[in-house]
Image (cartoon, helix red, strand yellow):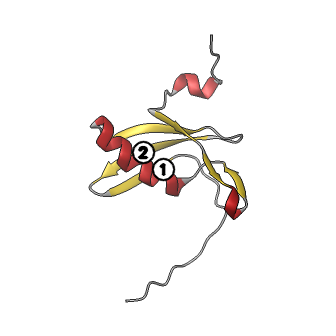
Amino acid sequence: MTVLPRPLRAVIPIFVSRVFVPGSGVDEDPVTGSAHCVLTSYWAKELGRDSFTAYQASARGGYLSCRLVGDKAVLSGQCVTVVEGVFHLGR
């Protein structure tokens, strides 16, 4: 028998992920938006769906609502800002 944490019982994710980047000093990323952009595109094509819920199973963990709109992944959920910045792209 598997006992799921209370929030997981309410929302069943389509996929569960974990992200490790030890070479960059990140033993495990709590919830990774950039990874889920790629995963949203992959799972949308695999499942023939354009929206679903994902869960990143780290110690802090978190749910993401994932939606594929054209070639763009739209992610939503509760978040914590850890860095802000501006990108300057050359032409």
Disc 1 secondary structure class: helix
Q: Does residue 12 sit above or below 75 in this rendering?
A: above
Residue position marked by numbered label 2 in the rendering: 66
**Label located before the other in sequence (1 or 2):** 1
Residue position marked by numbered label 1 in the rendering: 36
Q: Is residue 84 left or right of residue 48?
A: right
Q: Amino acid at mark 1?
A: His
Q: Which of the image's four quarters has the C terminus?
A: bottom left
Q: Does residue 25 sit above or below 17 in this rendering?
A: below
Q: Residues within 10 Å of mark 2 (few under 14, many from 20)?
A: many
Q: Residue furthest bottom?
A: 91
Q: Amino acid at mark 2?
A: Cys
Q: Which of the image's four quarters has the N terminus?
A: top right
The front one of 56 and 6 is 56
Q: Does residue 88 sit above or below 84 in this rendering?
A: below
Q: Position of residue 88 (x, y in %)?
A: 49, 84
Which label number is shown at residue 57?
A: none
In 3D space, how far apart are the residues under numbered discs 1 and 2 (Cα atoms)? 8 Å
Q: Position of residue 12 (x, y in %)?
A: 49, 27
